[in-house]
Structure formats: C-alpha cells, structure tokens
Image (cartoon, rainbow, N blue to C red):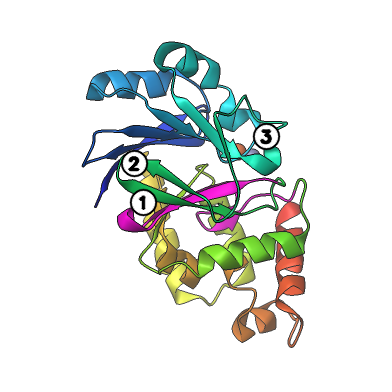
C-alpha cells in the first residue's frame, strides 16, 4: 500500500478521508464536510495538509474547506466541469487527468449522475477509489442533476475497476441501503451474509465504509442491473441495462 488512508466520520453521516503518501509524507484530504474532525485528526497524527480533493459541490462535502484553507493553505483540486460551483480551485481536472499525492498517482473518473461534474479519484497503487455520492456502500447517490443513463455509465466505469479495489464512499447510509437491496433481491445469499455483517458493525458503531468493489458487485443492486437474474427479479427480462437501473433507482426514491 502506497497510501495510508484514515476514515474520518463528519457531521451526522458523512465521511472524509485523509491519504498520506508513505514515500513522501504528502497528505491529501478527500472532501471537507466540516473542519473540526479533520483538524483534530491532522493534529493527532502530526500531519500537514498539502492538498484537498473535492468530489462534488454539495455543502456536505465542501463546508469545512475555508477553515482548512486558512490553517493549512492546501492546494484545492476539483472538477473543471463544476469549477463555477466549487470553491476556488488551484487545479481543475477532467476525466483522464491525474493528480499526484507525493508519489501516489490518482486518476480522475467522471461519475456524473448525482450531480453533473461529480468526479471520483482512483489510486491504482493503493487499490483505492474515492466515490463520494456516486457508488456508495450497497447504494448509489440520488439523481439530483443527471439522468439514469448518465449514472449507469458512471457506475459501469467504477464496476470495471479491478475487483480488489476498495471503495471509499461519502456516507454511512449502508443499513438503510441494505433494507432496500433486500427487497430487490431477497434471494441473494451474498447480500444476506453482508447484511448480517453490516448489522453487527452498526450495532457496535463501526463504519461500514470503505467496502470492497467485489462485495458491491455481488450485492449492490445498482451495480447489478445488467444481470439476467436482476432483470428477472424486477420483472424486466430483456430490457436494456440502463432502463433496469432507472427502474431500481426510481423504486429506491420512493422506498
Ligand atoms: Zn452530494
Ligand atoms: Fe453527500
């Protein structure tokens, strides 16, 4: 592992992540829901904050930034496509661009759908992807701005990453996502096993984020819309993948 990654619970149910490149000691933050828990973690670890990687413009991912900028003067990096709505960026990136945290290279993936201009950061050397409100543990973000086709395309890119990739998503929504997933695929044995694990973790107050992409592929209904078994489960045999995804997303919206 080229990166040491620390998960920081913020606000009621958000997560921020600190990434420290072991080779150089450079530290990056993914999203800034609020400043205090991040400042405290940096102080406890004795780390400086060199850069902030923003996934999208929603307040619960950026509100902590001004205080951190004031204290640490990090380089602020986000999507060029959303630069007009994000806080002032020092570096604006597109899909296919890369960002270096010391010697660890992150690849920018456009994962629009929840918002347009939402990006994910994939660090292959650390087998880590930071997905915020695109792919989430047992779920995906609500479609506030994008179309189902757009989100399905975004999720398909994430699904194509190596299956040992660890998914660092933005919220602790997993227990409620699990209830919905079970209504879609009640016979999915891997889902039943995962839900038992989630329930045990939440009872002890342990985060269910991050999760493995392999587990998401086996249990997350939103990554499974292309599978014949899923199409049968939702009564849409032979329908196009993005239409099946759209139907599952719509069911979740009213769940
Ligand atoms: Zn959001
Ligand atoms: Fe969010």
Q: Nearer the viewer, residue 214 or 106?
A: 106
Could you say where residue 143 lies in the image, as x and y percent from the top left?
Answer: 73, 51
At a point 76% along the width and 67% down the height, the residue shown is 247
Q: Confirm if mark 3 falls within 8 A of ligand 1.
A: no
Residue 168, placed above or below residue 78: below
Residue 108's disc number: none
Residue 204's disc number: 2
The magenta segment is: 117-143
Residue 200's disc number: 1
Dividing the picture into quadrants, the one containing residue 55 is: top right
Q: Real-space Cα distance between discs 3 and 1?
A: 41 Å
- Asked whether, in this view, residue 147 is left or right of residue 80, the answer is right
Looking at the image, is mark 3 or mark 1 earlier in the sequence?
A: 3
At a point 46% along the width and 31% down the height, the residue shown is 52
Could you say where residue 113 lies in the image, as x and y percent from the top left?
Answer: 70, 53
Looking at the image, is mark 2 or mark 3 earlier in the sequence?
A: 3
Q: Real-space Cα distance between discs 2 and 3?
A: 40 Å
Contact (CB < 8 A) between labels 2 and 1?
yes
Dividing the picture into quadrants, the one containing residue 115 is: top right
> Regarding mark 3 in the picture, which secondary structure is present there?
loop
- Given this view, does label 2 or label 3 mark the residue nearer the observer? 3
Q: Quadrant of the C terminus?
A: bottom right
> Regarding mark 2 in the picture, which secondary structure is present there?
loop
**Which residue lies under the disc numbered 3?**
83
At a point 34% along the width and 41% down the height, the residue shown is 204
At a point 54% along the width and 28% down the height, the residue shown is 90
């Amino acid at each position: 592992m080229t990166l040491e990654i620390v998960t920081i619970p913020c606000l009621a149910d958000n997560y921020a992540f600190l990434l420290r490149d072991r080779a150089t000691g450079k530290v990056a933050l993914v999203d800034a829901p609020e400043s205090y828990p991040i400042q405290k973690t940096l102080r406890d670890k004795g780390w400086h904050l060199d850069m902030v990687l923003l996934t999208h413009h929603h307040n619960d991912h950026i509100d902590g930034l001004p205080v951190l900028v004031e204290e640490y003067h990090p380089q602020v990096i986000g999507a060029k496509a959303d630069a007009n709505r994000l806080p002032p960026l020092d570096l604006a990136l597109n899909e296919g661009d890369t960002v270096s945290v010391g010697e660890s290279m992150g690849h920018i993936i456009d994962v629009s759908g929840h918002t347009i201009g939402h990006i994910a950061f994939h660090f292959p050397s650390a087998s880590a992807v930071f997905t915020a409100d695109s792919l989430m543990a047992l779920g995906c973000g609500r479609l506030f701005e994008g179309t189902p086709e757009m989100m399905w395309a975004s999720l398909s890119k994430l699904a194509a990453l190596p299956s040992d990739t660890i998914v660092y998503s933005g919220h602790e929504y997993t227990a409620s996502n699990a209830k919905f997933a079970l209504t879609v695929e009640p016979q999915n044995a891997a889902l039943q096993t995962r839900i038992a694990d989630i329930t045990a973790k939440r009872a002890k107050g342990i985060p269910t984020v991050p999760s493995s992409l392999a587990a998401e592929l086996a249990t997350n209904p939103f990554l499974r819309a292309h599978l014949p078994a899923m199409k049968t489960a939702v009564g849409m045999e032979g329908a196009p993948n993005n239409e099946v995804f759209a139907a599952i997303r719509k069911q979740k919206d009213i769940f």
